[in-house]
Image (cartoon, helix red, strand yellow):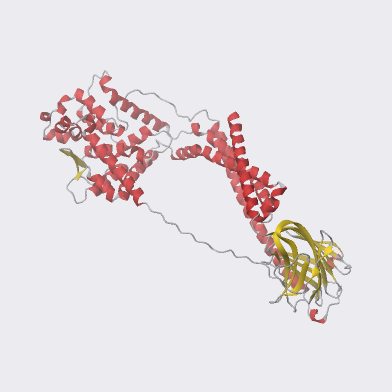
Amino acid sequence: MKKFLKKIVIILIISIIISIFLCVGIMQESSGGKIQYLNNLNYDVSLNEDGSINVIETWDIYVKDTGTLFKNFSLSKSLYGNITEVKVKDLENNKDLTQIYKETYHVGNNLFYALDIGANVFEIAWGTGMSTSSGNRKYQISYKIEDVITSYYDCQEFYWKFIEEGKNAIPVKYLTGKITLPQNVQNIENLKIWGHGQVNGNIEKTSNHSVEFKINNLKPNAMLEVRVISTEKLFNVSENKERKYHNLDKIIQEETEWSNETNTKAIITRIILITIYAIILIVYIIKIIKYRKFNKKENDGIIKKELKYTREIPREGDSTPNEAVYLYHFEKEKLETSAVQSEMVASTILNLCLKKVITLDIEGKNIYISILGDGSSLKKEEYQVYKLLYEASKGKERLEITELNDYAKKHYSNYSMYINQMVNETRNELYNMQLIDKKEEKMYRKSKSANMFLNGILCIFIFILTFLAMIHIPTFLIPMDISLGIGSRESFTILVLGITPLILVMLYSLHLKTKIENKIAVITQKGYDEKVQWEALKRFLEDYSLLNEKEVPQLVVWEKYLVYATAFGISNKVIEQMKAKYPKVFLEDSWDTEMKKNYPIIYFSTNPIYYSTYTIGTSPISMLNQGVSKAYSTSVAEIAAHNTSSGYGGGGGFSGGGGRRRWPEAGMGGR
């Protein structure tokens, strides 16, 4: 427990340090260039009986290096009339700004203009006096717009786009608005309202003559649109705003379709997210139940047996040196090719010679391999070595062992494929014989790696919580919104709170998973028993001269022993053991044609001419081992040298819909 707490403290300290650097980086990023950030934006809209509207906008804005603020209206004389009575007031000192009548890119302090600036755009712009400074400012912008209300036979409509999509460069933390009718409706049900834009917006009727709306974290370039319908006649509009037809049913149908579309998308998204969340949660709960049950076991369930020596070859007649090598070295994880390939290939070559599929000859310092049979009766893992030798000796009467290295250099991918397939086929054979449990092996590997994942997720989770705590310091509010997007802090908080239960379940599952490592028996009882036999056989071969053996194994048995001794890497020692029991095989006069035919492995290993010339370290089997080991190393080196990689990166664009409304008013910005 103390060790765990110590780890948590270390992670927490590191997380705090990283979070500080990130927050400082966010602040530095947000401090560069011009900045405009609306803390609050309020619309106070009065609908007049003549169909015009009076609007008062209140801006509580943070600006940096911004000398001019502006808002634009996209003019459309067919949809609404003139914009008049424009005023701008500095609420900090309750002073009206002075109007000028000339467009200028940088407006002087305490000045404003309200002009048509061409291309059907009407602009209100005013000076802040903060082109080289920063701080919060408050302004009130008021104006009147004529002929806004549209009248139909069955209803009257106020349909206004306060902010047009793609035209607002300023993020808004809190946006509120109130729309006041010129008089009460008799029945509040005759007043119908809708809002368009960000789905987190809310609009409601607060009385028989007022409507209020609000949106938190309005993103730059987002739209804000409000539609108010009265089925009672409240306005005496001008003739050009009279429509000689009924429109209420069409409006309701249109709004219903848009609402259903939005709700459907929201519901589908919510269902998908909840489903994914639930599936992941259920999966980990099932894992927790499984791991808890597993951890109740006292051990891996394997009955341990002791066997000091055995002279018997396990599954004699069916086993291969590859299986012996793999099972002897096997603990609980599958062996990598490089760890066992030399012993496997060399011992398999000897076994192929024993099975008379190939022959081995020695001339001087050279070892030669000749192909005899077709190898169709071989086990799959042996057949891979046979195919390798066959391919390497194509066009040659016999293959000199050093030429195997030449083949590996020229055909490195083929060489590597044959060796890897040999190891894989050996592993599959052990799976098929139920000596190794494939499912348990997979679980063991996952258990071994679980601790790494546990630490990784724990580090990330603690860092996220630390960062979450730090960004809730008020100092980081504006930098977060500017650098990461308006409302990023709230979105991040909701996300973290949402995934916390899942992460806790995941961490507990991984914690249990790390504890089952010693409870998993990757090797089966049958496999363990055979592994013990292979270990006992190796000890027998190593210690034979020390044993009080009354019966001396026949040469035909020593033939097989040499194959497995090569597999275990003790061939030189076994040759010495055999020399003590059969000294005559090391004499040239003892070998005739019949002896060479009947005992090809012993003859190859103890060739009198060769053996008497060289030391035990350069015996024929040692040379064979060195030859196959060098060839494998060459193939690996060639693969690494010829390995090339290429990458392709492509991107696509985003597309977005919405904003199919009219009454376009451009957005807000600063310069």
Vertical side of 83 occupied by 542: above or below = above
Horizontal and vertical percent for residue 105? 69, 69
Q: Residue 562 sits in which quadrant?
A: top left
Image-based side of 458 in relation to 110, left or right: left
Horizontal and vertical percent for residue 568? 31, 32
Image-based side of 113 in relation to 422, left or right: right
Image-based side of 528 in relation to 470, left or right: left
Residue 175 visible within the image = no
Q: Residue at x 42, y 56 (%)?
A: 646
Who is closer to the viewer here, 126 or 25? 126
Horizontal and vertical percent for residue 250? 74, 73
Vertical side of 412 occupied by 654: above or below = below
Q: Residue 508 sits in which quadrant?
A: top right
Who is closer to the viewer here, 209 or 524? 209
Q: Where the N terminus falls, by quadrant?
A: top right
Q: Count the marks: how many?
A: 0
Vertical side of 43 occupied by 238: above or below = below
Q: Which residue in the rendered view is the most extreme toward the top?
A: 548
Q: Where the C terminus falls, by quadrant?
A: bottom right
Who is closer to the viewer here, 575 or 593? 575
Horizontal and vertical percent for residue 385? 28, 43
Image-based side of 635 in relation to 500, left or right: left
Vertical side of 229 occupied by 2: above or below = above
Q: Residue 533 sits in which quadrant?
A: top left
